[in-house]
Amino acid sequence: MVKKKLPLFPLSLLLLTFLVSPAPSKTQIVSPSSIFAGGEWRLLHSNIGISAMHMQLLSNNKVVMFDRTDFGPSNLSLPNGQCRMDSNDSALKVDCTAHSLLYDVATNTFRPLTVETDTWCSSGAMLANGSLLQTGGYNDGDHTIRLLDPCETDQCDWIEYQDYLLERRWYATNQMLPDGRIIVVGGRRQFNYEFYPRNGESSSSTYWLELLRETKDVYENNLYPFLHLLPDGNLFIFANTKSISFDYTNNRVVREFPPIPGGEPRNYPSSGSSVLLPLQFGPGLDDRGTVQAEILVCGGAPQESFSNAKQGTFVPAVSTCGRLKVTDSNPKWEMEEMPLSRVMGDMLILPTGDVMIINGAASGTAGWDMAREPVTAPVLYQKDEPINHRFTVMHATTTPRLYHSTALLVPDGRILVGGSNPNPYYNFTNVLYPTELSLESFSPPYLAPEYNSMRPRILSATGFFTYKQFLYIRFAVADYRTASEVSIAILAPPFTTHGFAMNQRMVMLRVMSVAQFPWFVHEVSAVGPPSAEIAPRGYYLLFVIHAGVPSSGVWVKVQTQF
Ligand SMILES: *[C@@H]1O[C@H](CO)[C@@H](O)[C@H](O)[C@H]1NC(C)=O
Ligand SMILES: *[C@@H]1O[C@H](CO)[C@@H](O)[C@H](O)[C@H]1NC(C)=O
Ligand SMILES: *[C@@H]1O[C@H](CO)[C@@H](O)[C@H](O)[C@H]1NC(C)=O
Ligand SMILES: *[C@@H]1O[C@H](CO)[C@@H](O)[C@H](O)[C@H]1NC(C)=O
């Protein structure tokens, strides 16, 4: 058995406390660690020049961020004194400012990128070769795809292909597929899906998706559907309250799941969020189909929120999470109350396999100036705890992160938080919630210095491996427990926008043995993921977790055999 729960008090601290006071009460032992128990916020930049509306971490540890091109000058100049001329731009015909940048995690610096067409409310996914594929947007950008290669030089920039998409994709969702293609689903008034790359017979057609037509309301509200690739290769699609398992190859609904209880919509602008909980499997359970898959959906806004917010009434956000084991023969939503109601929260899978719910508001909905009561405290969801004991409220920041805010995990285990712009322009005055150009980091409790003696440091890892192949990871740890407390996780870096982390997925690798070497060094042998349905090929962050304490992540690539 592999334990993933974070220990309450590290051994070293326990000993120390015993020396100081021979008969300590429980609270005395716990209290030193409680300083960091709620995590820690840091301001990285008060002004990066743009508002981080969309973000993706690349395999060179740089984060691509972008907002939109049609809402006036940002506070960051385009490189080399360039200007973008667009006679159709509704805000600015000649714009010499950037609306995208590349942030370097290690140095905390950034440089502008050049995006020509409008990327507003678009989608994306990292391709198997490490390039970011971004799809759609608004106006001149709504049929555009854009590619950004990760590179070590300062040369790489967006390459745009206008009119690549068959339909307008504004508020669509992407997911990487086992064969390396990306499926692009929905968007405003688009009850269909298409693929990247666009090749073969299917190049001229999109495919109908009835679920999207059926779940929209009078305001067309069910956007940015939640997609998760299931272990059997079918696609889980959730829109507002309904969800299905969908065979996208044959355009066939495989299963209809029960609607989420409560009847409250969970998709844009009732923006809740969703994750596929980490996929794990034990001995003898490594074939496709036998892995269990659980979906978690949290937060949202009641049906009437949108029309009420338009009239200036801000209805409390949804307070529940639903968890559904989709691989059960008769799955039922298990409902749970969050300590804080939330709309527009982001849900991020942490290296420990737990989930951080961060950003958003306690009343209103997504949309221009449509939310109130920013929820500045993240909430930790510990998936292996019993129901009603899973949530812990973290320390709050002071910056509201509302509509158009984002968050993602970086390799050292921190969460990068940016954006928030509930205004149709860059508005810094005369508005309730000004456009946010700042960038913050949030360090979850597992980064507390008192866990450092138990924190594994990865010395080397097999960088490229294929399905079911053995791989080896060497790590050093000062205070080693037992092999049963070592686990290995790989995490696909998501594209995050509008509260949903597209393509986010964690797979636990099967640990075969842990060998002990001198000088605190250990070597784990583990087995690569069983199939491309469980882990599509591409780049992942690999973490070693020891006694609940995660290492920093290193990049590995899952690939097919040559
Ligand atoms: C960014 O804002 C500062 C302060 O308002 C201003 O001095 C600077 O010129 C701005 N830069 C750009 C590129 O807009
Ligand atoms: C402006 O829009 C028109 C109509 O869609 C199009 O024909 C023209 O090429 C656009 N101009 C630019 C500079 O994009
Ligand atoms: C990845 O593949 C795409 C084509 O799908 C290509 O445009 C891009 O340059 C490739 N990236 C790398 C890093 O090779
Ligand atoms: C927001 O900014 C735009 C463009 O600068 C301006 O036209 C508009 O009046 C501003 N809105 C408010 C509420 O200040």
Image: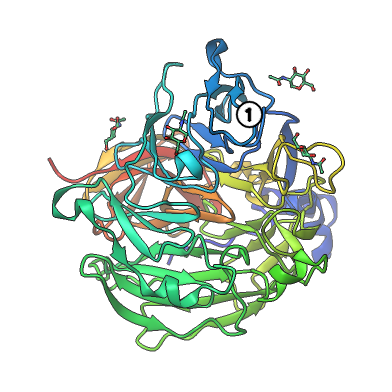
Q: How is the image coloured?
A: rainbow
Which quadrant holds the N terminus? bottom left
Which quadrant holds the C terminus? top left
Where residue 350 appears, as percent x and y from the top left, is 54, 53
Can you identify the residue that label 1 sits on?
A: 92
Where residue 172 appears, as percent x and y from the top left, is 45, 55
Where residue 432 appears, as percent x and y from the top left, is 85, 48
Q: Is residue 558 left or right of residue 51?
A: left
Q: Is residue 337 left or right of residue 355?
A: right
Q: Residue at x 64, y 48 (%)?
A: 404
Q: In the depicted view, which residue is nearer to us: 75 or 94?
A: 94
Q: In the depicted view, which residue is nearer to us: 537 or 452?
A: 537
Q: Residue at x 60, y 83 (%)?
A: 263
Q: Quadrant of residue 262?
A: bottom right
In the image, is the residue at mark 1 within 8 Å of ligand 4 by its beta carbon? no
Residue 10 in sight: yes
Where residue 161 appears, as percent x and y from the top left, is 34, 34
Question: Dot 1: few (<14), some (14–19), or many (≥20) neighbours within 10 Å?
Answer: some
Residue 294 in sight: no
Q: Residue furthest bottom?
A: 330
Q: Amino acid at mark 1?
A: Leu
Report the number of numbered marks: 1
Rendering quadrant holding ligand 1: top right
Local secondary structure at mark 1: loop
